[in-house]
Image: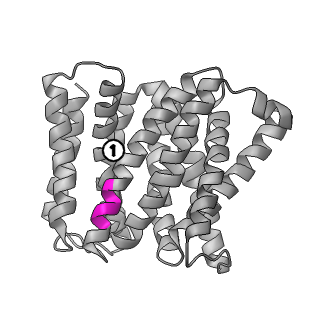
């Protein structure tokens, strides 16, 4: 149990650092370029890890997954890396790190709703109230913020990219859990399969991008490598560990504190975000909603 809580705490730190690092890169190069490089760099690292640390051969990498692993993790790859990560980068570019962090509780509420509908399970009154409170608060803040409470570059683009991020990452989480438990594959193996299946889709995105360029400044490469290690590799691993060690309800409740953590870093450490009672109220209400739906 202690391992699970430690994994959850380190996950929040990795996710926070990853959001600021990816935001730095997203404002200096195309989202498709970053998404492509994230998948390629992550895939290369995980492939080497599986081949040398777990002593697997190339043929075994493709033979071990079951049909359900391929199906669900393939859906997770498309919705997560090709969809969720791309739109999240767009949101970081047009919105802000603080606004992007507020999406986290909404994703938690949407995951619970999606899972209940997917499993044809009835929704209790507290769950329904929590889902409505969390989604209503987050979406409402995205709609009515317009740069008045949290500064944004482009309100309309920050709004649609935020909603698209919530939808795509919700699907990614549900499909990732289904794919990881459908057969005996390791956490890193599940991540490798998602990255592999995401590769053709992000390549497709890159081909259609007009302003693509893989020639980046050295500082951007360093930022990307750090972000990929912290969020894509370490973050995904810790997400699975914490989910299975302390349970998804407890873990998702802890994740719902992410907006407050990012806001603290953005305002107190980096001195970029000014005090906003409206944002703090929205973050606390969204957290209260998550607590309700986990009852």
Q: Can residue 187 be spotted in the picture?
A: yes
Q: Residue at coordinates 42% horizontally, 66% vertically from top-left?
A: 90
Q: How many marks?
A: 1
Q: Quadrant of the C terminus?
A: top left
**How has the structure been colored for display?**
one colour
- Crowd class of label 1 (few under 14; some 14 to 19; many from 20; radius 10 Å): many
The dominant secondary structure in magenta is helix
Residue found 22% across the figure and 31% down from its top = 293
For residue 269, which quarter of the picture? bottom left
Q: Is residue 38 magenta?
A: no
Residue bearing the label numbered 1: 107
- How far across and down, in percent of the image, does residue 99 sit? 30, 62
Residue 241's x, y, as percent? Answer: 53, 32
Residue 55 visible in the picture: no
Look at the image and say whether residue 159 sits in the magenta stretch.
yes
Q: Which residues are magenta?
A: 158-163
Does residue 47 lie above or below 54 as drawn? Answer: below
Residue 227 x %, y %:
57, 60
Report whether 174 appears left or right of 182. Answer: left
Q: Label 1's element?
A: helix
Q: Residue at x 28, y 38 (%)?
A: 109
The one nearer the camera, 21 or 78, is 78
Is residue 39 placed above or below 269 in the rendered structure?
A: above
In screen coordinates, is 251 left or right of 273?
right
Residue 68 image offset from top left, x and y in percent: 59, 25
The residue located at (34%, 49%) in the rendering is 166
From the viewer's perspective, is residue 158 above or below residue 123?
Answer: below
């Amino acid at each position: 149990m202690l391992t699970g809580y430690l994994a959850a705490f380190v996950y929040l730190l990795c996710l926070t650092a990853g959001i600021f690092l990816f935001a730095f890169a997203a404002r200096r190069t195309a989202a498709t370029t970053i998404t492509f490089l994230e998948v390629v760099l992550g895939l290369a690292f995980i492939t080497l890890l599986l081949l040398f640390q777990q002593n697997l051969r190339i043929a075994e990498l493709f033979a071990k997954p079951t049909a359900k692993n391929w199906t669900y993790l393939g859906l997770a790859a498309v919705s997560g890396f090709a969809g969720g990560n791309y739109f999240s980068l767009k949101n970081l570019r047009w919105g802000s790190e603080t606004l992007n962090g507020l999406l986290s509780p909404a994703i938690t509420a949407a995951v619970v709703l999606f899972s209940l509908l997917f499993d044809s399970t009835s929704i209790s009154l507290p769950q329904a109230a929590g889902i409505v409170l969390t989604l209503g608060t987050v979406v409402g803040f995205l709609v009515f913020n317009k740069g008045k409470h949290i500064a944004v570059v482009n309100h309309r683009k920050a709004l649609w990219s935020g909603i698209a991020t919530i939808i795509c990452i919700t699907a990614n989480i549900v499909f990732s859990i289904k794919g990881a438990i459908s057969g005996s594959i390791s956490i890193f193996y599940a991540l490798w399969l998602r990255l592999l299946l995401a590769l053709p889709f992000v390549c497709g995105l890159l081909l259609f991008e007009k302003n693509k360029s893989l020639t980046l400044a050295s500082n951007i490469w360093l930022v990307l490598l750090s972000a990929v290690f912290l969020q894509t590799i370490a973050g995904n691993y810790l997400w699975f560990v914490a989910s299975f060690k302390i349970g998804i309800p407890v873990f998702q409740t802890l994740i719902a504190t992410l907006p407050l953590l990012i806001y603290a870093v953005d305002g107190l450490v980096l001195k970029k975000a000014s005090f906003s009672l409206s944002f703090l109220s929205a973050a606390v209400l969204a957290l209260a909603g998550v607590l309700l739906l986990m009852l």
